[in-house]
Image (cartoon, rainbow, N blue to C red):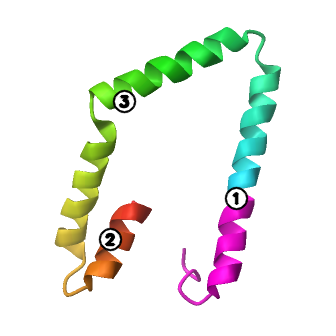
Amino acid sequence: MLAGAKLPERLHQTIINGLGLFTAAIGIQMFIKTGNAIIVLVSLLVGGVLGEWWRIEDGLRNLGAFLEKRFISGSSPAQGSRFIRGF
């Protein structure tokens, strides 16, 4: 995060992709260790349904917009949307 603005875009994307692959590998490893895959499936389904029902993503987006207004003054609209996406 500290050096992100100074890195070339290609290198930045490579780092983000590497972190995504690392996270996916850990998730797959944990899934394989699970004794009951049905529990994982049901947990994902219940979590997805509850998240949509409670509109968690909208709440996080609104919180990001609030924080942006509170802490970023005089920023360009493009920078503001980056802040919300990053949040």
How much space separates mark 1 and mark 3, taking CA atoms? 24 Å
User: From the image, which quarter does the N terminus lie in?
Assistant: bottom right
How much space separates mark 2 and mark 3, taking CA atoms? 23 Å
In the rendered view, would you say 24 is above or below 13? above
**Residue 7 lies in magenta, yes or no?**
yes
**From the viewer's perspective, is the residue at label 2 or at label 1 nearer?**
2
Q: Horizontal and vertical percent for residue 58?
A: 27, 45
Along the viewing direction, whichever of 30 and 61 lies nearer the viewer: 61
Which span is picked out in magenta?
A: 1-19
Query: Counting other residues with Cα less than 10 Å from the Cα at mark 1, is it few (<14), some (14-19), or many (20 or more)?
Result: few
Checking the image for residue 42, the label placed there is: none
Task: Give the amino acid at mark 1.
Answer: Leu
Q: In this view, does 21 lie to the left or right of 7?
A: right
Query: Counting other residues with Cα less than 10 Å from the Cα at mark 2, is it few (<14), some (14-19), or many (20 or more)?
Result: some
**Residue 40 lies in magenta, yes or no?**
no
User: From the image, which quarter does the C terminus lie in?
Assistant: bottom left
Numbered label tally = 3
Q: Which of pointers 2 and 3 lies earlier in the amino acid sequence?
A: 3
Task: Give the amino acid at mark 3.
Answer: Gly
Which residue matches tag 1? 19
Checking the image for residue 51, the label placed there is: 3
Task: Give the amino acid at mark 2.
Answer: Ser
Q: Under tag 1, what secondary structure?
A: helix
Q: Under tag 2, what secondary structure?
A: helix
Q: Horizontal and vertical percent for residue 6?
A: 58, 90
Which residue matches tag 2? 81
Q: In which quarter of the image is residue 3?
A: bottom right
Query: Counting other residues with Cα less than 10 Å from the Cα at mark 3, is it few (<14), some (14-19), or many (20 or more)?
Result: few
How much space separates mark 2 and mark 1, taking CA atoms? 22 Å
Whether pointer 2 and pointer 1 mark residues with C-beta atoms closer than 8 Å, the reply is no
